[in-house]
Amino acid sequence: MFSGDIHLGRSPHRLAASGLIPADYGPEVALIRLVDEAIARRVEAVVLAGDVVDEPRDRFEAFGVLERAARRLSGAGIALYAVAGNHDGDVLPRLAARVEGFRLLGAGGIWERVAVPGAGRVSLLGWSFPTRVVRESPLGLPSLAAALEGRAEEEAVLGVVHGDLDAAESSYAPLSTRALERVPVDGWLLGHVHQPGALSVSRPVGYLGSLVGLDRGEPGLRGPWLVEVRGRGRLSARQLALGPVLWRPLSVDLTGVEPTAEALGEALLDRLVGARAEAPPRVDLIACSVRLEGSPLGRAQPGWWEALSPERLLLPGRPAVAVVAVEDHTSTRRPLAELARIGGPIGVLAGLLERLEGGGPLPEGLDLTLGAARRWPRQVEEAPLPGDRELLLEAGRRMLDRLLAQLEEVR
Ligand SMILES: [Mn+2]
């Protein structure tokens, strides 16, 4: 059983505003579930693909959690392996030395191959971050070929490494898909990016994803991957949706709805009940990021929905459903062409948006600003952002609505 980034020590703290206890839905709970499942399924090994620990200051919590996990697994005859990532390049090797039964692969940045006990002819090929920053691809290291020497003809090898796929300039162990594919192994299971890749293929090369979504930037199902090896080149991988919280975007169309807290409450309740009905069985909480869309009746003041406070937007039950964020993307939906004829700032902006919507070129000089916006803040490095055009259109639409509201106020 394989897990991507766990980030022990991090907490989905946003849930506190909903009156929930964040730790109930965090990495520790997710890891306990993984161990339960590994024992129930009698797997041979549990393998963690780096960023097991969020920060060195989290060593105390991580030590306790990993010690317990290792003890339970070894009691069931299951081996526990890990590679270190950019977050825990310093701390994980030290913890591995302290925790009995916790085996670090590729310590010190030197590739290593180990046979998995009890798994027939299956071995793991791993590499660990020796420091928190690695600018060269670990696939260029001479220890890679050395680690593969002496491999038996019928031996299946699974590669496990933490790194940045197809990002040559990355400071976090850049790895190219092509170079990974050239290594004669049966698959690569990677840590780093929190969005899981498509690994349910005969020769998987991609990210395992976070073990549990840590914030709303990680929507969708999360959990460990069950990898079965029936022989060389005969692999199957499937994800087990064990994450206690499911972060999900939820759009609510307010077209034709009065812009009052009352009417919004009703529309929201409908959608939350619907989201609960679609929940997978092991999810305890659905944390929704609501996006208000459409054209409500009449003119609403910016922020009118704030009358609904987060601690009231919680549907208890199993799973519980919480609204953790609301973004107002409702629009006047007056045709841009009509607004463009108004003149002044509204006309200029509407004209620009019209050209953008029509597929026209992005305005010059904006690429630098957008580049900066993408690199900052660090917390979103692992979450996908919308495209440049979409970002601009969203911001422009919002600005246009504000300008129109101001115009109305003046009148
Ligand atoms: Mn990472």
Image: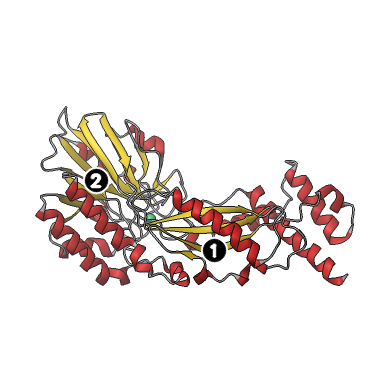
- Describe residue 55's horizontal placement relative to residue 149 as left or right: right
Q: Position of residue 41 (x, y in %)?
A: 19, 44
Q: The disc labelled 2 sits on which kind of residue?
A: Met
In terms of secondary structure, where does tag 1 sit?
A: strand
- Ligand 1's quadrant: bottom left
Q: Is residue 398 visible?
A: yes
Q: Decide: few, some or many residues near mark 1? Use Cα within 10 Å; few <14, some 14-19, many ≥20.
A: some
Residue on which the image places disc 1 = 325
Q: Residue at x 32, y 61 (%)?
A: 27
Residue 217 vs 188, above or below: the answer is below
Q: Nearer the viewer, residue 107 or 388?
A: 388
- Describe residue 192's horizontal placement relative to residue 253 as left or right: left
- Describe residue 11's horizontal placement relative to residue 120 as left or right: right
Name the image quarter holding the C terminus: bottom right
Name the image quarter holding the N terminus: top left
Q: Position of residue 380 (x, y in %)?
A: 49, 59
Q: Position of residue 284 (x, y in %)?
A: 37, 58
Q: Position of residue 370 (x, y in %)?
A: 63, 55
